[in-house]
């Protein structure tokens, strides 16, 4: 997921109209992952901003949708965190394949969008959302020549 908040129409499709899931994604998860990325990139260096992100984490991991589906989401979140750590470590590598890996995987947080789609609408629904999300992520993070932005 590469937008501060998902487009409302897309959000409704992802969540099959589940208001709790939509609130989790749009008002909690999406801002949270963007704030983390801003901290990593140095765009949120002020201690107050960092602490606000920690406060948001409390809201994310105590949100009713998360608590209701913690068994499905917790392990995935740990995998996403690990993958994101690899992308951060390799994004400026001298080895081209590591930079390409980092570029490809830097939007791994959107896997939660696919997981929410699966929880709300099943496997086939998640498959439809998955391809669309990957395309959005690519285009949001690359220029017309395919160069990462």
Image: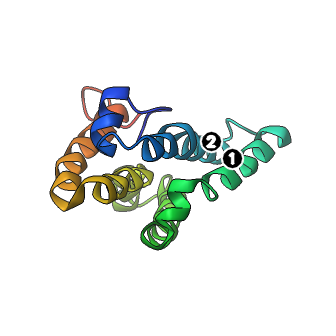
Which comes sooner in the sequence, label 1 or label 2? 2
Give the quadrant of residue 43. Answer: top right
Q: Residue at x 28, y 58 (%)?
A: 118
Tag 2's secondary structure?
helix
Q: Which mark is residue 56?
A: 1
What is the residue that sits farthest to the right in this orientation? 47
Q: Quadrant of the C terminus?
A: top left
Front position in the image: 84 or 48: 48
Q: Residues within 10 Å of mark 2 (few under 14, many from 20)?
A: many
- Does 80 sit above or below residue 75? above
Q: Residues within 10 Å of mark 1 (few under 14, many from 20)?
A: some
Marks 1,2: beta carbons within 8 A? yes
Give the quadrant of residue 136. Answer: top left
Could you tell me residue 117's position as x and y percent? 30, 52
Q: Which mark is residue 35?
A: 2
Tag 1's secondary structure?
helix
Q: Residue at x 23, y 54 (%)?
A: 126
């Amino acid at each position: 997921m590469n937008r501060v908040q998902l487009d409302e129409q897309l959000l409704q499709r992802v969540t099959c109209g589940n208001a709790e899931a939509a609130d989790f994604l749009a008002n909690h998860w999406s801002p949270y992952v963007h704030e983390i990325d801003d901290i990593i990139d140095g765009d949120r260096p002020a201690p107050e901003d960092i602490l606000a992100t920690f406060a948001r984490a409390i809201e994310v991991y105590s949100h009713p949708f998360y608590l209701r589906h913690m068994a499905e989401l917790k392990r995935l979140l740990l995998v996403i965190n690990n993958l994101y750590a690899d992308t951060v470590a390799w994004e400026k590598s001298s080895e081209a394949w590591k930079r390409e890996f980092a570029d490809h995987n830097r939007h791994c947080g959107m896997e939660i969008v696919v997981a929410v789609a699966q929880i709300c609408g099943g496997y086939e629904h998640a498959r439809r959302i998955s391809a669309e999300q990957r395309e959005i992520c690519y285009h949001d993070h690359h220029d017309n020549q395919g160069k990462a932005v």
